[in-house]
Amino acid sequence: MDKLSIRDLNLTGKRVFIRADFNVPLENNKVADDTRIRATLPTLRLAIERRGRLVVASHLGRPKGKPDPKYSLAPVAARLKELLGRPVVFSSDCVGQEALSRSQALKNGDLLLLENLRFHPEEEKNDEQFSRQLASLCDNVFVNDAFGAAHRAHASVVGITKFVAQAAAGLLMEQELSYLGKALTVPERPFLAILGGAKVSDKIGVIENLMKIANAMLIGGAMAYTFFRAKKFTTGKSLVEEDKIDLALTLLGEARERRFRIVLPVDHVLARSPDDTATQIAGVEATPADWMGLDIGPKTIASFRSEIAAAKTIVWNGPLGMFEKPAFASGTLAIARAVAEATAAGATSIVGGGDSVAAVEQVGVAKKISHISTGGGASLEFLAGQKLPGVEALTSREV
Ligand code: AMP
């Protein structure tokens, strides 16, 4: 990587501002899923080992620029203390006198967690004065480990980097960039992309970019229906983005010109509504008017499985059906197993997006995936070939 890494920094006795992604779900004032906190532990442990004085900050949820106890990071402080097995000091505001004096009181290896950055509207506005205030909490060193926020030009991601001497990537950030970066630049082939989820519109950039890089793409989930309409199939009550049908047609045409294989489902599981468990399996060409497609069918699963088994690089984002409902989960879960099997046989697999990650966890194969991306939006932008402002803002190695 051409950006400075936390591994390059001398942190002894220095206050280091670490931007983490602790945007975790809370339930009854407790962290309901600590995956994101665990993902940043290696970075925190390294900074502690190097005798730094850690000032750690994150956003959580969308508190709309003002303090809201529902989005407090206090439960994160409690969980972090358990995970690290050492004290965590908490500041009830991320800027101001309390934060400043607590940061100044830190000793080597101590950790201060700041309250939610988004309690201040200036965070999302990338406000210069606010960025300067954040920077005043550290001794000129900033580490960004929040890959999940790297596509946002916010004060704690971009603004702060102007007011420090060194802005480096944390270990999680490095790992994310390394896996995704390799897939886009030097993938082992065949390189297979698997896309699902609700909307084509969220993934247009990814489809266009991966068409130039990958060898083939499997498309499932609701987004397949917009492509079916482009192919003049009837789709009944299936979810279709009417205003994206022309675009889907263009993408199919582009793929044909590039000799790029877009593989769509050939059969699917239908129901009259997502809550109806009376289902039928049918081909995809003609869905009856009052039925909707909610999962890929067995023939599609078989063909997707053999594509996956042959791949050497696999990038998967988005469920292949409405997998939250057990009646429509088989396709997504079968794909999760197939990706894990291919990985065991030597492929590199990258799974991103909340639902696909939940699926690999549900079938108990998360550990078998080469890399689980913690940042849904950021990984999609990266796969779409866009530069992430939070990465661009880091200090280049040669400086
Ligand atoms: P996304 O946020 O775009 O990744 O979409 C995820 C959502 O797409 C999940 O909540 C799924 O239930 C939904 N989804 C996937 N396939 C279908 C489908 N065939 N019909 C309706 N919803 C679907």
Image (cartoon, rainbow, N blue to C red):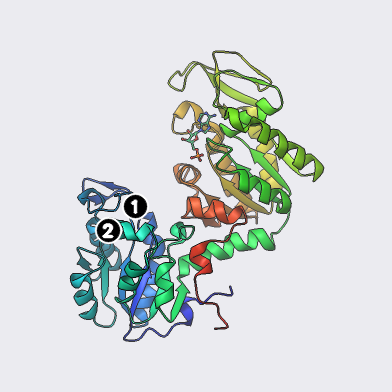
Residue at numbered disc 2: 76
- Identify residue type, mark 2: Val
The one nearer the camera, 267 or 217, is 217
- Identify residue type, mark 1: Val
The one nearer the camera, 163 or 286, is 163
Mark 1 Cβ and ligand 1 under 8 Å apart: no
Q: In which quarter of the image is residue 81?
A: bottom left
Q: In which quarter of the image is residue 241?
A: top right
Q: Which part of the image, by quadrant, shows the N terminus?
A: bottom right
Can you give x and y, in whole percent of width and height, for residue 104 in the image?
23, 80
- Residue 264 can be seen in this image: no
**Above or below for 240 versus 134:** above
Tell me whether circle 2 and circle 1 mark residues in contact (CB < 8 Å): yes
Can you give x and y, in whole percent of width and height, for residue 106 in the image?
23, 79
- Give the distance between the C-alpha atoms of the residues marked 2 and 1, in whole angstroms: 8 Å
Q: Residue 24 carries which label?
A: 1
Instruction: Name the side, left or right, on which 276 lies relative to 342.
Output: left
**Above or below for 247 versus 50:** above
Q: How crowded is mark 2: few (under 14 residues within 10 Å), some or many (20 or more)?
A: many
Instruction: Name the side, left or right, on which 215 lies relative to 275.
Output: right
**Above or below for 74 versus 323:** below
State the residue at coordinates (45%, 44%). Answer: 358
